[in-house]
Image (tube, rainbow, N blue to C red):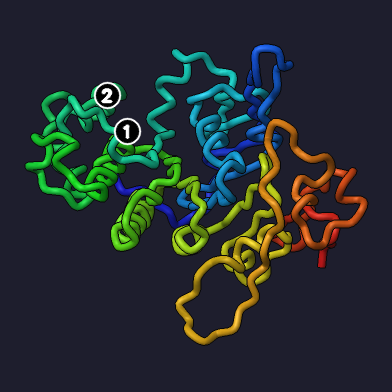
């Protein structure tokens, strides 16, 4: 595998502008059709060698955003660019050669691997599809990939069910790594693993990024994990980005009330240290009928009348830190 230089900044490797994903649904035989507002106009950018964490409660649209960016489901509207090239309008055939640069590691390491194929066959598939190495060199490349994710070469002859959950996720990472991608979308890729195994997989992802310059869109709900791996963090609520900032700034000085509430719930290994938990009232509203104005106003302890009627614009508070809240103004 070729090691990429990550020392110099380059253009955006992935950019998303005003991305929308709506799902039409029927709510009953005689009920009028409805629309699930899964993703409702988000903007994201990912630089070479960077990890962008995408966080929020379950049902906020994180995975829908990831699947739409990957092209697993078509966007309702918006623009997605990979290496400067627009990909959301490409046909399936035109998109095929570009998929080598945009890979994914799924949440469930068992269901994402074909149980009828050996690990060697699973890893050979992307090598063959994208013509990464000649047929004569595939066995050597497979052994190299397995070694890179901490598995023995003999694993190539075994089936996914013969491995533990953490080992299966390593196989999924090796498969994503096989075509030498520029971007990997990690969709809750450690949430199904034990805590000790999570740490091993996170450290593996960080090592691979350091060595090969891969960029990660890291989708998760565990803010402690996101803090460890990310360079920047975007906070999502009910289909919209409410805050985005460098990791240090967001965790030290969160500006959106939703971000503050999420961070107040993160366990800290500091016995005896006083902390104030910010409870959120009620449940997340249904994406079938999202609230008007700021979507967080129904649960926000600081909401004012303006929040109920006017959608807050994303405002740059300081370099690298933006928030969508009527109550926050630039420094």
Disc 1 target residue: 112
Q: Nearer the viewer, residue 112 or 44?
A: 112
Q: Nearer the viewer, residue 249 or 27?
A: 27
Element class at badge 1: loop
Return the x and y of residue 309 as percentages of the image width and height: 90, 43
Please tell me which residue is depicted at 61% across the width and 68% down the height of the picture. 264
Element class at badge 2: loop
Return the x and y of residue 46 as percentages of the image width and height: 55, 45
* Relative horizontal placement of residue 85, taking residue 177 as reference (left or right): right
Q: Is residue 259 above or below residue 68?
A: below
The residue positioned farthest toward the right in the image shown: 305
Please tell me which residue is depicted at 87% across the width and 47% down the height of the picture. 308
Quadrant location of the C terminus? bottom right
Quadrant location of the N terminus? top left
Mark 2 crowdedness (10 Å alpha carbons): few <14, some 14-19, many ≥20 = some
Return the x and y of residue 235 as percentages of the image width and height: 63, 52
Please tell me which residue is depicted at 50% across the width and 70% down the height of the picture. 267
* Relative horizontal placement of residue 100, taking residue 319 as reference (left or right): left
Q: Is residue 69 above or below residue 188?
A: above
Q: Is residue 41 above or below residue 131?
A: below
| Image quadrant assignment for residue 318 | bottom right
* Relative horizontal placement of residue 77, taking residue 226 as reference (left or right): right
Disc 2 target residue: 131
Please tell me which residue is depicted at 45% across the width and 60% down the height of the picture. 225
Mark 2 vs mark 1: give the one in front. 1
Cα separation between marks 2 and 1: 22 Å
Q: Nearer the viewer, residue 171 or 277?
A: 277
The disc at residue 245 is none
| Image quadrant assignment for residue 134 | top left
Q: Earlier in the sequence, mark 2 or mark 1?
A: 1
């Amino acid at each position: 595998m070729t090691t990429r230089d990550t020392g110099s900044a380059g253009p955006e490797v992935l950019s998303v502008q005003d991305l929308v994903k709506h799902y039409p649904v029927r709510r009953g035989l005689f009920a009028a059709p409805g629309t699930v507002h899964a993703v409702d106009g988000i903007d994201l950018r990912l630089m070479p060698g960077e990890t962008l964490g995408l966080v929020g409660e379950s049902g906020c649209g994180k995975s829908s955003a990831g699947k739409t960016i990957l092209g697993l489901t078509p966007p309702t509207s918006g623009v997605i660019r990979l290496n400067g090239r627009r990909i959301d309008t490409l046909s399936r055939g035109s998109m095929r050669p570009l998929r080598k640069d945009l890979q994914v590691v799924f949440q469930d390491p068992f269901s994402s691997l074909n149980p009828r194929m050996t690990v060697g066959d699973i890893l050979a598939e992307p090598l063959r599809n994208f013509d990464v190495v000649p047929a004569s060199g595939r066995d050597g490349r497979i052994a190299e990939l397995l070694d890179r994710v901490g598995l023995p070469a003999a694993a190539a002859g075994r089936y996914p069910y013969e491995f533990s959950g953490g080992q299966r996720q390593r196989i999924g990472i090796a498969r994503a790594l096989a075509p030498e991608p520029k971007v990997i979308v990690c969709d809750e890729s450690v949430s199904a693993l034990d805590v000790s195994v999570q740490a091993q997989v996170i450290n593996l992802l960080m090592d691979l990024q350091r060595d090969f310059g891969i960029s990660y869109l890291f989708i998760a709900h565990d803010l402690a994990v996101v803090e460890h791996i990310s360079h920047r963090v975007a906070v999502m609520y009910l289909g919209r980005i409410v805050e985005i900032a460098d990791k240090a700034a967001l965790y030290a000085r969160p500006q959106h009330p939703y971000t503050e509430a999420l961070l107040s719930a993160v366990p800290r290994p500091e016995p005896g240290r006083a902390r104030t938990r910010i409870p959120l009232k009620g449940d997340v509203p249904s994406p079938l009928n999202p609230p008007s104005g700021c979507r967080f106003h129904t649960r926000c302890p600081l909401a004012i009348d303006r929040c109920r009627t006017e959608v807050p614009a994303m405002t740059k508070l300081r370099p690298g830190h933006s928030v969508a809240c009527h109550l926050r103004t630039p420094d």
